[in-house]
Amino acid sequence: MTATAEAVAQSHASVVVTSRLPDSVERTLARDYHARLFDRDDPMSAEALREALAGHEVVLCTLTDRLDRAMLTAGAGRVRLLANFGAGTNHIDLGAARDLGIRVTNTPGALTEDTADLTMLLILAAARRAREGDAEVRERRWRGWRPTHLLGTRVSGATLGIVGLGRIGQAVARRAAAGFGMTVRYHGRRRASAEAEAASGATFAPELEQLLHECDIVSLHCPATPETHHLIGAPALRCMRRDAFLINTARGDVVHEDALIAALQDGTIAGAGLDVFEREPEIPEALRTLPNVFALPHLGSATRASRVAMGECAVRNIAAYLRGEPLPDRVP
Ligand code: DGY
């Protein structure tokens, strides 16, 4: 296609965006695709989502859009590409999309470093009791320095267990080993490549139970799939050590939230650092109030750099689709 023909094809493509995006990304979408933008900073309603699917060939969606089989079937009309703004695609029924001839892309890589940074923040905050210290300061309860005040757990030199040595898991492993002198173990469905192991310095634990038992800190980086649903439930939590911490920046439903609350309350584990929850944006009362939980509202990729990179990645996938080229980040 010539540059002019391509510009014409792109400008006539029907693109709809289901959430508010960074300004620069919205400007590109408006300029190159006359995309229908979404001007509210809230998730799109189910009805509007159905209309978007029915009326547009390309839908730039995100993780708050529930694109299950019923929604995709009800909305089936013009949509041919779901360009997801985000790496995780567990909100999309990929089987249904396949059945309906809808292709799906995501934005892997764009948010790796920032999510890994936030993981380190959760590790440090949980182990060093940042939540309790912050509350004391804000509530004017601090009585001054004492040798026994809010003693936490040393992170440097600890053993970190990573569940899922993908991009983010590797980035966390690198930080933990190089920055904190941690010993890093990992578990996954399959052993990672020799390059991934060498680059991350992580060694394989073939059994999840073994990893849970060995580590001072366990950090989840696996995708949410039927196989990982409630992977960390009561039996897994019982394999962890009583002085260990669980960190989750992956997806809420990898952890059985009720079992986690019980484990945090009865001392089965020492604490948790959580960025994701089973029923976002709902967070159970216990996870909001327990002193041994440090919780954030799904901020893993929340830097300007990551969110712009995610938008640009989604735009690249849309451009490739409209040019009839292979999709750079196709989700199988
Ligand atoms: C993703 O990309 O799926 C992340 O959860 C967004 O922060």
Image: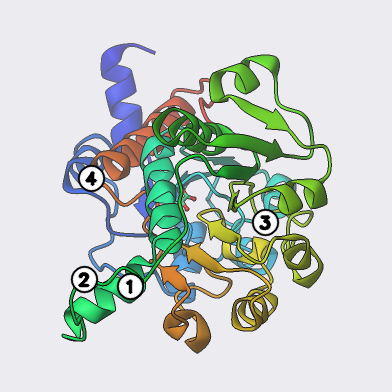
Asked if the residue at tag 2 contacts the one at tag 1, i.e. Cβ–Cβ closer than 8 Å, the answer is yes
Mark 3 or 1, nearer chain start: 3
Task: Tell me if mark 2 has few (under 14), some (14-19) or many (20+) residues whose alpha carbon lies within 10 angstroms of its own.
Answer: few
Q: Amino acid at mark 2?
A: Trp
Query: Marks 1 and 2, how far apart in space?
Result: 7 Å
Residue 12 seen in the current view: no
Asked if the residue at tag 4 contacts the one at tag 3, i.e. Cβ–Cβ closer than 8 Å, the answer is no
Asked if the residue at tag 4 contacts the one at tag 2, i.e. Cβ–Cβ closer than 8 Å, the answer is no
Query: Marks 2 and 4, how far apart in space?
Result: 37 Å
* Residue 304 - label: 4
Query: Marks 3 and 4, how far apart in space?
Result: 29 Å
Q: Residue furthest top?
A: 2
Query: What residue would you read off at disc 3?
Result: 93
| Secondary element at image label 2 | loop
Residue at point 38% right, 33% down? 313
Left or right: 255 in relation to 109 = right
Q: Nearer the viewer, residue 205 or 142?
A: 142
Q: Amino acid at mark 3?
A: Asp
Query: What residue would you read off at disc 1?
Result: 149
